[in-house]
Amino acid sequence: MRKLVPVAIAYDFDGTLAPGNMQEHSFLPKIGIKAKEFWNMADQLAQENEADSVLTYMNLMLKKASEAGVPIRKEDFREHGKSVKLFKGVQDWFDRIDDYGRGKGLKLEHYIISSGIREMIDGTPIATKFKKIYASSFKYDVNGVAEWPALAINFTTKTQYLFRINKGALEVYDNKRINKCVPPENRPIPFTNMIFIGDGETDIPCFSLVKRLGGHSIAVYKPRAKGARTEAEKLITDGRVNFVAPADYSTEREIDTIVKAVLDKITSDSKLVLLSQSAAKL
């Protein structure tokens, strides 16, 4: 039996698999702050202190929740994650695309690379579909109460996790393996077998890296949002992505067609490599 070819599909979360920011669904209403007010406050604090914007918003979440008397345990964040609405077709997307890939001789692995809160993503119904969820997270005390940010993933550090997938160094604390020199042909998942799906400016470093190294980058946008496709298509003009599509993951919608076409190409390319290797042995 022929070994399945490994393929990684990495996703941003907010704006990619779910509309808006995950904090806006139930967390911010619970602490009594409107979304615009919260993000403006976080941006102002980051500017005033020349601070990382992700660390700033995470600390602000803890501060405002404490002031409002709202519990901030790991289980509370997971509960907030249950209220996150997903884009159409997302919930059954992973099983469908896995089946398609398997039929083409591919073994798909799904990853999240997000600046959002990992514990909230853990509370969504799709959490079990990912081999690894790379997202910002908190350090918790013995009672499970969030104390301070343990990991902050911003738009530039996101690229680190693509290399972790590429090299198979999946644990965030494993600095030796990620920095080890590994010939491209010995890496578990080559960039040519990688797809990155994101939604905007914060994903540009990942878009560009994957595309430049032979993989495929896809920018999604909120369906029917005025001017959204035009804005997304600028990423093609600027050479950042290969494709754009509405964030509707239903069968036979645009992104479904695009990803299946990319998987078809990976299958064909893999067969050509095998034929070339066989010919070289003759």
Image: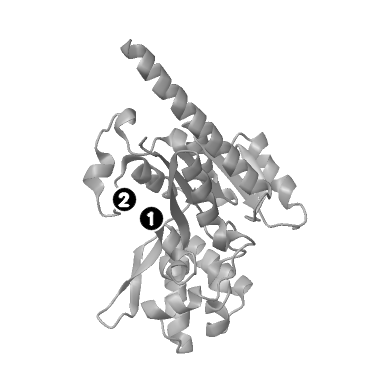
Quadrant where the N terminus lies? top left
User: Residue visible at 68% across and 57% down?
Assistant: 222
- Is the residue 27 above or below the residue 229 in the image? below
**Residue at 54% from the left image edge and 32% from the top image edge:** 265
Badge 2 marks a residue whose secondary structure is loop
Dot 1: within a 10 Å radius of its alpha carbon, few (fewer than 14), some, or many (20 or more) residues? some
Q: Is residue 81 left or right of residue 138?
A: right
In the foreground, 37 or 161? 161
Which of the marked residues, 2 or 1, is nearer the chain's N terminus?
A: 1
Residue 261 in view in this figure: yes
Tell me how far mark 2 sits from mark 1, CA to CA.
9 Å
Q: Is residue 47 above or below residue 200?
A: below
Task: Tell me which corner region of the image, top left, top right, bottom left or bottom right, holds residue 28.
Answer: bottom right
In the image, is 32 to the left or to the right of 160?
A: right
Q: Which residue is mark 2?
A: 170
**Residue at (49%, 77%) from the top-left corner?**
80
Q: Residue 171: x, y in percent?
A: 29, 53
Residue farthest to the top, as pictured: 282
Residue type, label 1: Lys
The answer to which of 188 and 117 lies nearer the viewer is 188
174 in relation to 215, above or below = below
The answer to which quarter of the image holds residue 63 is bottom left
Question: Callout 2: few (<14), some (14-19), or many (20+) C-alpha neighbours within 10 Å?
Answer: some
Residue under label 1, please give it: 131
Depth check, mark 2 against mark 1: the one in front is 1
